[in-house]
Image: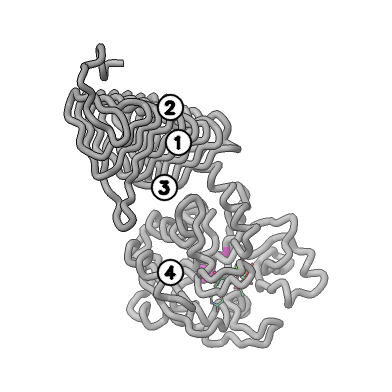
């Protein structure tokens, strides 16, 4: 199926209802731009080409599109969905397969649904196959109009629909497979004689049906919310909720305990090992990796670049960023660890802070295995704390502490006596 389809993702819309300086499709959902979810779909479907139609601020798309090896197509004026698709014509000159139209503002779509649509399109040899959905409240969507034999004759846009057509609950999700040649032939005949004075891609359906070409459809029955377009910040919050629960469900199914899914935020692409427990009011940002049998939270914030190894405990009111926390290490309360490599079996006392920012750069802290960091220690980076070293409560450590050494005070200095069993607590 793969090489038979090229994808065109429409993403040039202004997204005015978002009231934002950032293009709508670049707004993040669970740590990842909306458009990246659609690009992921294109990747999963192994489309032979992925073209993304962008409008204003096209420079903001470059990094993301490069990452996915997708090609940007520029639409200088928003003249409508048919005009957006027309812009891809040149690049697809030598391509003779099918086109899958996707929208950059539909991040909730599932690959399974699209595969089914593409298969139906190929199997039925249709000129167009529309993904439709039954919506309780179809307001704003294009309605699917059928004749007495249930054949699709046209899609009528909400603003152009006659009163009886407004009652139709089957809507166009926007996702349509087309035979390429038929599509571009029909597009040249599309005019702007409609309520929005735009070139509607949906008019291609009326043109094709009028010529007696086969127009098929697949109606989403499972989870119709997946076709929802994001137009406002309310929609964005709703999508965030759905995506968050999808991510949590997947983790739960893989053996992670999430004590209260309603009160837990875990971004896309985090990995958590089985038998780890995540307590409420915890935020785990993108790409964080957590091992097995760990305990995280409540009220814990793990930011990008964090890796927590097996059996570590990161307790309440804690933040970790760009750091590794070794096996069996305890960091149970009120601590900030940034830009640090913490070994195994370390005790990070309550209130420990890595002072990692010198005003210009982020500096590194290394804490070796079995070190004991006393409560309320400030570790001024760059800094190394040796194996089994100990810092006294309230220390401000500014210089390297050697293995087994015990320091205390402000600034911290080595203690003359060796405390009993230091570092083995
Ligand atoms: C469109 C469909 C409608 C469908 C609905 C589903 C048309 C005419 N209508 O309506 O049948 O029910 O989606 O959500 O296609 N875009 C561009 N360039 C443009 C205009 C739009 O790239 O000149 C992009 C937008 O960024 C967006 C997509 O195309 O991703 C859809 O455009 P939008 O204006 O939101 O269409 P709707 O009115 O929602
Ligand atoms: Ca829309």
Displayed quadrant of residue 412 = top left
Q: Which residue of the protein is positioned furthest toward the top in this rendering?
A: 420
Mark number displayed over residue 318: 1
Q: Earlier in the sequence, mark 1 or mark 4?
A: 4
Above or below: residue 157 compared with residue 375 = below
Q: Name the mark nearer the viewer: 1 or 4.
A: 1
Q: Residue at x 43, y 27 (%)?
A: 332
The answer to whether the residue labelled 1 contacts the one labelled 3, judged by CB atoms less than 8 Å apart, is no
Q: Where is residue 268 in the image (x, y as percent from the top left)?
A: 44, 47
State the SS at label 3. Answer: loop
The answer to whether the residue labelled 2 contacts the one labelled 1, judged by CB atoms less than 8 Å apart, is yes
Q: Position of residue 334 (x, y in %)?
A: 46, 33
How far apart in space, not on screen, are marks 4 and 2 (Cα)?
Answer: 56 Å
Q: Earlier in the sequence, mark 4 or mark 3?
A: 4
The response on whether ligand 1 sits within 8 Å of label 3 is no
Q: Name the mark nearer the viewer: 4 or 3.
A: 3
Q: Position of residue 234 (x, y in %)?
A: 65, 58
How far apart in space, not on screen, are marks 1 and 4 (Cα)?
Answer: 52 Å
How far apart in space, not on screen, are marks 4 and 3 (Cα)?
Answer: 35 Å
Q: Residue at x 51, y 75 (%)?
A: 12
State the SS at label 1. Answer: strand
The response on whether ligand 1 sits within 8 Å of label 1 is no
Mark number displayed over residue 98: 4
State the SS at label 2. Answer: strand
The residue at which mark 2 appears reads as: 332
Along the horizontal axis of the image, is 420 left or right of 276? left
How far apart in space, not on screen, are marks 1 and 3 (Cα)?
Answer: 17 Å
The residue at which mark 3 appears reads as: 286
């Amino acid at each position: 199926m793969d090489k038979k389809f090229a994808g065109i993702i429409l993403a040039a819309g202004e997204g005015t209802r978002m009231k934002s300086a950032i293009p709508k499709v670049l707004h993040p959902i669970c740590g990842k731009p909306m458009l990246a979810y659609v690009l992921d779909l294109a990747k999963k479907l192994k489309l032979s080409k992925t073209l993304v139609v962008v409008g204003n601020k096209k420079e903001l798309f470059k990094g993301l599109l490069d990452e996915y090896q997708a090609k940007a197509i520029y639409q200088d004026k928003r003249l409508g969905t048919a005009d957006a698709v027309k812009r891809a014509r040149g690049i697809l000159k030598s391509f003779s397969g099918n086109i899958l139209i996707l929208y950059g503002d539909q991040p909730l779509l599932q690959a399974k649904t699209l595969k089914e649509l593409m298969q139906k399109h190929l199997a039925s040899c249709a000129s167009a196959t529309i993904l439709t959905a039954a919506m309780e409240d179809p307001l704003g969507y294009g309605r699917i109009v059928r004749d007495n034999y249930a054949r699709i004759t046209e899609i009528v846009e909400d603003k152009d629909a006659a009163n009886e057509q407004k009652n139709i609950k089957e809507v166009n999700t926007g996702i349509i497979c087309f035979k390429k040649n038929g599509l571009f032939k029909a597009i040249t005949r599309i005019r702007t004689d409609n309520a929005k004075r735009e070139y509607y891609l949906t008019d291609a359906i009326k043109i094709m049906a009028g010529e007696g070409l086969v127009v098929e459809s697949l109606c989403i029955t499972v989870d119709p919310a997946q076709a929802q377009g994001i137009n406002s910040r309310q929609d964005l919050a709703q999508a965030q909720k759905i995506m968050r629960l999808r991510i949590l469900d997947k983790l739960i199914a893989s053996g992670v305990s999430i004590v209260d899914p309603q009160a837990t935020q875990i971004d896309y692409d985090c990995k958590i090992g089985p038998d780890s427990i995540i307590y409420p009011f915890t935020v785990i940002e993108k790409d964080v990796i957590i091992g097995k049998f760990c305990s995280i939270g409540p009220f814990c914030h793990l930011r990008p670049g964090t890796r927590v190894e097996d059996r570590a405990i990161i307790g309440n009111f804690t933040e970790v960023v760009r750091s590794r926390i070794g096996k069996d290490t305890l960091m149970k309360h009120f601590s900030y660890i940034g830009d640090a490599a913490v070994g195994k079996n370390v005790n990070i006392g309550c209130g420990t802070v890595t002072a990692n920012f010198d005003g210009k750069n982020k500096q590194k802290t290394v804490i070796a295995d079995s070190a004991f960091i006393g409560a309320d220690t400030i570790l001024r980076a760059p800094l190394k704390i040796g194996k089994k070293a100990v810092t006294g409560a309230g220390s401000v450590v500014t210089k390297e502490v050697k293995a087994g050494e015990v320091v205390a005070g402000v600034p911290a200095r080595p203690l003359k006596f060796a405390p009993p069993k230091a570092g083995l607590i």
